Image (cartoon, rainbow, N blue to C red):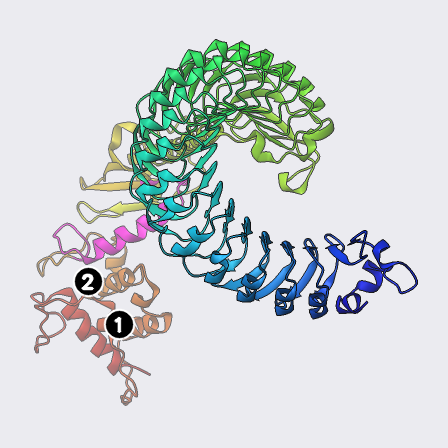
Amino acid sequence: MAVKAGFGNAANALADWDGGRDHCAWRGVACDNASFAVFALDLKGNKLTGQIPGEIGDCVSLKYLDLSFNSLYGDIPFSISKLKQLEDLILKNNQLTGPIPSTLSQIPNLKTLDLAQNQLTGDIPRLIYWNEVLQYLGLRGNSLTGTLSPDMCQLTGLWYFDVRGNNLTGTIPENIGNCTSFEILDISYNQISGEIPYNIGFLQVATLSLQGNRLTGKIPEVIGLMQALAVLDLSENELVGPIPPILGNLSYTGKLYLHGNKLAGEVPPELGNMTKLSYLQLDDNELVGTIPAELGKLEELFELNLANNNLEGPIPTNISSCTALNKFNVYGNRLNGSIPAGFQNLESLTYLNLSSNNFKGQIPSELGHIINLDTLDLSYNGFSGPVPATIGDLEHLLELNLSKNHLSGSVPAEFGNLRSVQVMILNNNSLAGEIPAQLANCFSLNTLNLSYNNLSGHVPSARNFSKFPMESFLGNPMLRVRCKDSSCGNSNGPKVVLSRWGIACIVLGFIILLCVMLLAIYKTNRPQPLVKACEKPVQGPPKIVLLQMDMAIHTYDDIMRLTENLSEKYIIGYGASSTVYKCVLKSGKAIAVKRLYSQYNHGAREFETELETVGSIRHRNLILSRADDNTVMEAVDSEVSVTCTDMGLVRKAFQLALLCTKRHPIDRPTMHDVARVLLSLMPAPAMKPVTASKTVDYTRYLATTPDMDHGGADIGDNSSSDEQWFVRFGEVISKHTM
């Protein structure tokens, strides 16, 4: 009862342990028939919690103690070493912590010590190795540290040594070959380094498991002499060099695991002599050459994995003779050729992976005869032609991947018979036609990828198709998808799935639209065809700019009469927004008449620019140019000369008018300034001059010239420039400021 009290939840788990019943009838208790002493306590899997009670050491008659598969924690009590008759101590699959008590070596008859799958730490006590009676040592799945002691071979009665999945370091003891009693040696998934000792070949073990360490060097050829080997696992290390052909002598070996190393060279044909071989895993190495045809002799071969190597050539046809083959994986090599039609004889095959190779040709319809196939992966190859409809006969198929090939034709309607299929990947082919509605019968289908093909029509909307995302159908320009979730945008109407061709069409359409717009702009800016006056009579007085050739201006009616209503025969040039006519006046003087096209809004701006340009040019034929003293400005109407005989004042007024046509407002005089200038041109009244309170700087209205002279010449000096004259003119204005 003291033992019961020591467990955390014994009240429930050991409810039948009470003082009113015979203790030999309690759960898990076995007694000697003569002495009624308890010799066995089997409480495995009773959901016991708490720590192992120290009172357990008082059960001195115990020979068998099994507390495995509970939730016990804490240290292993030292009191257990008091059980001198104990033969089997099984504490695996708990949460025990702390070190392995070295006092366990004081149990003289201990044959089985199984402490696996706990959280024990520290080194393996060396005294444990000197127990000549110990037969079974199970320490896997803990956090033990330290190294493998050479004393381990002192366990002369031990047949099972398992320290898998700890943190052991160091090297394999050089005297490992002296552990002649070992039948199972498992030191896998530790941090053992160094090379495999040569004398390991003297072991008579049936299982040699060294995988998941940091072993280097070559595989010792002496291992080929270990005739008792049933399992040889050297995988997931850093072994180099070739696979020793002598391994072919291991005629009783059923499992050969060499994957995950850096082995090079070719696959030895001698491996075909391992007639009992059922598992051959050589994947993830650097093997070259071809697949030996001799492997076809392995009639008991269950799994052949050659993936992720550099193998070339075709698959030997006699591989189809391995009728027991269940898994065949050659993923990630450089194999070529076609799939042997004889694969239909592999009735036990459930997994076939030929992806990421250089296979070509058509997929043989015979694959549909491998009735137990659940995974078929032919992706990333060069297969062409139609998809065999017979694949629809694979009623156990769970995963189908035919992506990244050159398959054509339609998706077989027979695929609707794949009631168990969960994954169907057919993307990046040249499949055409409609998606068969029969696929809605694939009730287990949860992953579908038909993207980047040439499928057309509508995606079936029935049943399980509503759960597939839009990405499943991308890249099919003619395929229409009815979206039923917010991720598709408009959920009510059909939506065309964009593809590479669709994007290309959109880009092409944009380019065409851009070209049309540019052409329209070009045509808009082209000069308009001339229109005869009789066909297009002018409505009202048009805007006319006169570029003076001989400084003569007449009225609108005179110009229209002299040019016969702007007849074509008077055209001397045209631009983008105007036409220029030549008009010979009655006096014989010729002028240029520019007619602006009213449909161009920018014509007025160009007109202002021309006025500004003309106003800044000094030329004898332009209004701002200076003539000799006796020349009368013929740019002025003759009636003006009757009332105003001072042509200098007229010239000044014209210059002021040109200043008012400047493009930018800041360059133009204000109306107040214009009024002052015009007032200054009038005769001065007989009154006392008033000193101006403010002088206007009229030079800001004129272009500054390097040769501007502010000397003492009078206002009428013809040798000075217009700019100089106007500066002085501004001074005169200032003197007459009111």
Q: Is residue 18 left or right of residue 472?
A: right
Q: Say which amino acid is labelled 2.
A: Met
Disc 2 element: helix
Residue 162 higher or lower than 300, as above or below: below
The residue to which callout 1 is attached is: 681
The residue to which callout 2 is attached is: 647
Q: CA distance from mark 2 to mark 1?
A: 12 Å
- N-term-proximal mark, 2 vs 1: 2
- Residue sitting at x 35%, y 41%: 557
Residue 689 sits inside the magenta stretch: no
317 or 625, which is in the foreground?
A: 317
Residue 596 sits inside the magenta stretch: yes
Classify the position of the N terminus by image quarter.
bottom right
347 or 469, which is in the foreground?
A: 347
478 or 579, which is in the foreground?
A: 478
Measuring from the top left, give residue 139's x and y in whole percent. 54, 54
501 or 206, which is in the foreground?
A: 206
Measuring from the top left, give residue 227's x and y in whole percent. 41, 30
Residue 570 figure quarter: top left
- Residue sitting at x 70%, y 63%: 60
Residue 520 figure quarter: top left
> Is residue 172 among what the camera can see?
yes
> Is residue 554 among what the camera can see?
no
Residue 308 higher or lower than 396, as above or below: below
Measuring from the top left, give residue 157's x and y in whole percent. 51, 47
Q: Say which amino acid is labelled 1.
A: Leu
**Magenta segment boundaries in residue numbering:** 595-624
Q: Farthest residue toward the front?
A: 34
Q: Residues within 10 Å of mark 2 (few under 14, many from 20)?
A: some
Measuring from the top left, give residue 249's x and y in whole percent. 37, 25
Residue 627 figure quarter: bottom left
- Residue sitting at x 54%, y 57%: 142
